[in-house]
Amino acid sequence: MKRKALLGAGIVAASWLLAGCEAIFTGATVETRALEAEAGGGFRPVTFRLEPEMSPVALNFRAELGNHPEETGKWNAYAATLTRDGATVASGSFNVNYTGSVELPPANPDLVMVMLATPVVNGGEYQLTIRPLGPLEVTLQNPRVELRRNVELPAGGRQG
């Protein structure tokens, strides 16, 4: 009986982990751009041309984690904001956790996570800004943003 309960709990946990991943695996990649670091730990704003036929879109954060055992249990917290003509269209926050340990480097050093997923109502130039929400504790290599079009939004609709 306990084994079935543990199996059921594991399945529920796995479904929670995969919830929201639709914007990573569905749709099509439009482009991937390198992020340039700014003083203070954020990244320089990135401008994208978005059109309603791309809707919904996802902006995914990608980077590599090196082997830094001293970063075990640490993370970076960021706020991502998408604006059009100075007005906020979508915003959210995300954490980058170091997934390794003192004994083992990260099992998957290639990090990808959804920053924002949102419908596009009006075509035009949109600007993505990524700012730190606290001190940076995790070293990132090759940070970049991936724009995906026609993604499936998580059940319940809009994210970000």
Image (cartoon, helix red, strand yellow):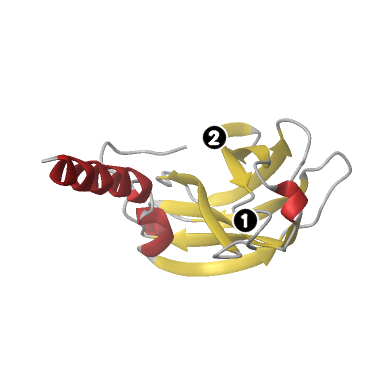
Q: Position of residue 70 (x, y in %)?
A: 77, 49
Residue 31 position, x and y percent, is: 57, 68
User: Going 17% across and 40% down the picture, which residue do you hit?
Assistant: 2
Nearer the observer: mark 2 or 1; the answer is 1
Q: Which mark is residue 100?
A: 1
Structural distance between the alpha carbons of marks 2 and 1: 25 Å
Q: Is residue 52 visible?
A: no
**Image coordinates for residue 130, horizontal then vertical, percent:** 69, 42
Rendered-image quadrant of the N terminus: top left
Q: Nearer the viewer, residue 41 or 157?
A: 41
What is the count of numbered marks? 2
Q: Earlier in the sequence, mark 2 or mark 1?
A: 2
**Mark 1: amino acid:** Gly
Q: Where does label 2 land, which residue?
A: 92
Q: Position of residue 117 (x, y in %)?
A: 44, 46
User: In the figure, 34 relative to 48: above or below?
Assistant: below
Element at label 2: strand
Q: Amino acid at mark 2?
A: Gly
The crowding category of the residue bearing disc 2, from other C-alpha atoms within 10 Å (few below 14, some 14 to 19, many at least 20), is: some
